[in-house]
Image (spheres, rainbow, N blue to C red):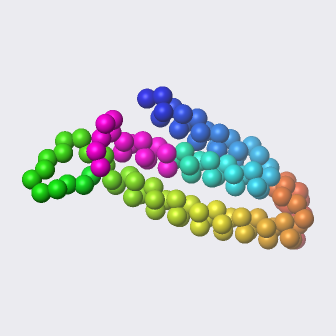
Amino acid sequence: MIVYLLCLVLFSVGLYCILVKRNIIKIIIGLIIMESAVNLAFILFGYRFAGRAPILAADQIVKNMVDPLPQALVLTAIVIGLATTALIAAIAVRIYDRYRTFDITKIRRLKG
């Protein structure tokens, strides 16, 4: 149970970075932290204590198998998260090239 609370704390740290920080790079790092917390929570939902791999042989009955679906979903989410992080980082670099700052408040003042 404590591990789920730690996932919630990790998610809260990422959410804090997104809502409070004004630097684009810090916001991106907060987004990555939130993504990691969600991925960790998915893996924990599929975990079973003393579970076995979901590989069955002929005439074998395994009662305590680990669920492979969350693992597959997290693998897909990691790839998608990497692509979105790269896209956001590229946009941040373009914003820096244009405005010469990563501060959101200064960017809002420099409209035009």
Write down the region rendered in magenta.
Answer: 39-53
Q: Which residue is drawn at 58% across and 42% down?
A: 11
Q: Position of residue 90 (x, y in %)?
A: 72, 69
Q: Which residue is drawn at 20% across and 54% down?
A: 56
* Nearer to me, 103 or 26: 26
Quarter of the view holding residue 103: bottom right
Q: Position of residue 100 (x, y in %)?
A: 90, 65
Q: Which residue is drawn at 64% across and 44% down?
A: 14
* Nearer to me, 63 or 86: 63
In the picture provided, is 3 more to the left or to the right than 103? left
Residue placed furthest toward the top: 2
In the picture provided, is 59 more to the left or to the right than 37? left
Image label count = 0
Q: Which residue is drawn at 28% across and 45% down?
A: 52
Q: Where is residue 93 in the image (x, y as percent from the top left)?
A: 79, 67
Q: Is residue 111 in the magenta section? A: no
Residue placed furthest toward the left: 59
Quarter of the view holding residue 1: top left
* Nearer to me, 77 or 99: 77
The C terminus sits in image quarter = bottom right
